[in-house]
Image: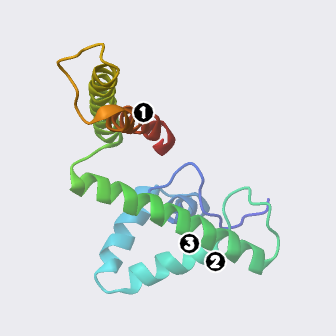
Amino acid sequence: MDRRLYRSRTDRMLFGVCGGLGKYLGIDPTIIRVIFVLLAFTGFGILAYILLAIIAPVEESQKKTPQGIVEENVAEIKDTATKLGSDIHDTFAGKDKEAKEEAEAEQMRSRNALGIIIIVIGVVCLLGALNIFHWINWWGGIGAVALIGLGILLIVGMGRNK
């Protein structure tokens, strides 16, 4: 039996170091996690965890050379840290993904409504410039067309932002 140290893909909190160590040593990974937390107060636990996260290959990794393993691990650490940072930012900003999407949808509905109102005003002004509504002669034809164009830009421009 080939017993090797791997970072776990399934039993992980951050990078799978404790899950892999637990499997390698045949003990519960929670005990390993507690040990790392206690060692973190000395500074050694953090350093050891980071080194193991960089050096130990991921379970079922396709990389065979040490350089390939380190490159794969650094890329994974970068992706995980970026996602973790984004989650922390969203948490402290008070917005989760659903709330953020709902706010964006509400903003889109508001801009669409504003665009429609501006188009209607532009059409009424254009009809006034054509003497269909003789009591409305607001800005003439050019101003009315500009209002209609502005309303269309508001509505169509929002579709491109997504």
Q: CA distance from mark 2 to mark 1?
A: 56 Å
- What residue does disc 2 label? 55
| Residue 117 appears anywhere in the view | yes
Mark 1 or mark 3: whose residue is earlier in sequence = 3
Residue 53, numbered circle: 3
Residue 56 drawn above or below residue 123: below
- Label pair 3/2, CB-CB below 8 angstroms: yes
How many residues crowd around disc 2 within 10 Å: few (fewer than 14), some, or many (20 or more)?
some
Residue at the (66%, 62%) spot, across then down: 58
Q: CA distance from mark 3 to mark 2?
A: 6 Å
Q: Amino acid at mark 2?
A: Ile
Q: CA distance from mark 1 to mark 3?
A: 53 Å
Q: Position of residue 117 (x, y in %)?
A: 27, 26
Colour mode of the rendering: rainbow
Residue 42 drawn above or below residue 136: below
Q: Amino acid at mark 3?
A: Ala
Secondary structure at badge 1 equals: helix
Residue 152, numbered circle: 1
Query: Left of 2 or right of it: where is 79?
Result: left
- Label pair 2/1, CB-CB below 8 angstroms: no
Q: Amino acid at mark 1?
A: Ile
Q: Position of residue 92 (x, y in %)?
A: 22, 57
Residue 104 drawn above or below residue 49: above
Quadrant assignment, res 35: bottom left
